[in-house]
Image: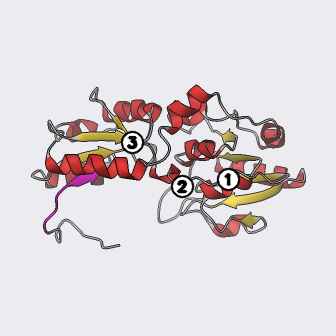
Amino acid sequence: MPVATPETVGRADLLVVTGAGDWPVECAERFRRLPLAVSSLAYLGPDEAALAHRLRRRLGLFTWLTSSSRSEGRAFAGYLGTRRPIHVVGSPQTDDLPERAPEPDVVLVATSVTRPDDTGGAAPGTEVLLTAAEELDRAGKHVVVGLHPREDRSLWERYEISDVPTVRASARAQACIGIPGTVFPQIAAVGTPLVGVTDPALRVPDYLLDVCSSTIDDASLATKAVSEARLPDRRTLTDAVGPVGGSAARLLGVWRLAALGR
């Protein structure tokens, strides 16, 4: 994939930013003449971003805001500190969902980042998740690990590490356990129940917790929680997942309208 820096950008039709952190805001302010779209492509914090006021100044009449679902849209609006409408397009990751075929005693562990390194920090609750996997293994569960792209693989090599993406791996699991994150609604869309591992320091939007059958902060509770895991009701699921199928086309269609100033 070609990569450009602000110094090397030539002609462009549209600037898409995915949040209100330092870098997206810097780009939005630097490329003021470009049409802008603001899209939630991964979950963001539940509170208004510190630089959201600067990004709001960049929003024009034809700036489109998008999210994958209604509940993500509400959280995204709070993060941006705006009352502007959020256009729900669905998640492209759900355009080709696998058919669920759960295997006996298979539990998917969706990892986050357990130990901080040069690429960034660690998520609260990850040590509990690591211990929970050990508890599940001792209880006779077959642990399959869906690795976060930044996770240290060596921490999980005693288990089966999935060679397919986490959402696809969830199709063979009786349940999934992990730190609530972007992938949770997508796994729920497959039909796999979720158990969230939480921590007092963890700050995530409510909709990521709503799709969980239960949440735990003690690894000793993992086996019982996984065994009893169930999907949320249809209304909660629809609110968190958004439309399934055709989402990539809808997102690109919105970006095209934004580029055309419509």
Please provide the residue range marked out in magenta. Answer: 10-17
Q: Earlier in the sequence, mark 1 or mark 2?
A: 2
Kind of residue at badge 2: Asp
Residue at position x 44%, y 31% in the image = 70
Query: Mark 3, residues whose alpha carbon is within 10 Å: few (<14), some, or many (≥20)?
Result: many
Kind of residue at badge 1: Ser
Image color mode: secondary structure
> Residue 162 lies in what quarter of the image?
bottom right
Residue at position x 22%, y 54% in the image = 15
Marks 1/3: CA–CA distance: 23 Å
The label number, if any, that marks residue 89 in the structure image: 3
The label number, if any, that marks residue 185 in the structure image: none
Q: Is residue 103 left or right of residue 191?
A: right
Residue 13 or 38: which is nearer the viewer? 13
Marks 3/2: CA–CA distance: 15 Å
The label number, if any, that marks residue 96 in the structure image: 2
Q: Is residue 204 left or right of residue 33?
A: right
- Residue 11 percent across, percent down from the top left: 13, 66
> Residue 79 lies in what quarter of the image?
top left
Residue 235 or 208: which is nearer the viewer? 235
Q: Earlier in the sequence, mark 1 or mark 3?
A: 3
